[in-house]
Image (cartoon, grey):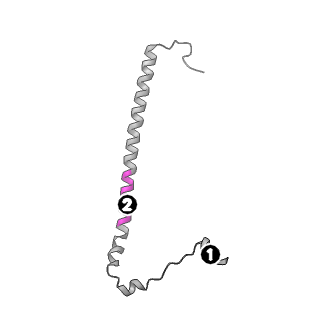
């Protein structure tokens, strides 16, 4: 049930509705832009954190000798698909 259903809808009402709709669209756009900017900042800080966590390890890789590098064991394929193919 509408509150003003007995009141006639005139030009002033239509103009007010248009103004409110325009304001809602603009506010929605501002919020969307702000949300996107915040998400981009979060991604940038996450990338920075990950990079700083591994920076020390990357620097230590420079000290690995060729023999040590060649003696690193292979990971191998331990996936279920590979195991099933071997059984066949």
Nearer to us of marks 2 and 1 is 1
Residue 46 counted in the magenta span:
yes
Residue 64 quadrant: bottom left
Q: Residues within 10 Å of mark 2 (few under 14, many from 20)?
A: few
Q: Residue furthest bottom?
A: 67
Q: Residue placed at 63% from the left, 74% from the top?
A: 85
Q: Residue placed at 41% from the left, 28% from the top?
A: 22
Q: Residue furthest front?
A: 88
Marks 2 and 1 close (CB-CB < 8 Å): no
Is residue 63 shown above or below 80? below
Instruction: Give the labeled residue for mark 1.
Output: 83
Instruction: Give the labeled residue for mark 2.
Output: 47
Is residue 8 shown above or below 38? above
Q: Residue placed at 37% from the left, 63% from the top?
A: 49
Q: Nearer the viewer, residue 6 or 32?
A: 32
How far across and how far down the image is residue 36, in percent? 39, 46
Marks 2 and 1, the one that precedes in the sequence: 2
SS at circle 2? helix
Residue stretch rendered in magenta on the structure? 40-51
């Amino acid at each position: 049930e509408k509150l003003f259903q007995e009141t006639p809808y005139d030009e002033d009402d239509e103009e007010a509705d248009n103004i409110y709709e325009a304001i809602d669209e603009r506010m929605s756009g501002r919020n969307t832009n702000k949300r996107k900017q915040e998400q981009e900042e979060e991604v940038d800080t996450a990338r920075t954190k990950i990079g700083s966590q591994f920076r020390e390890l990357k620097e230590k890789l420079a000290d690995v000798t060729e023999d040590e590098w060649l003696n690193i064991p292979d990971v191998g394929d331990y996936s279920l698909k590979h195991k099933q193919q071997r059984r066949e």
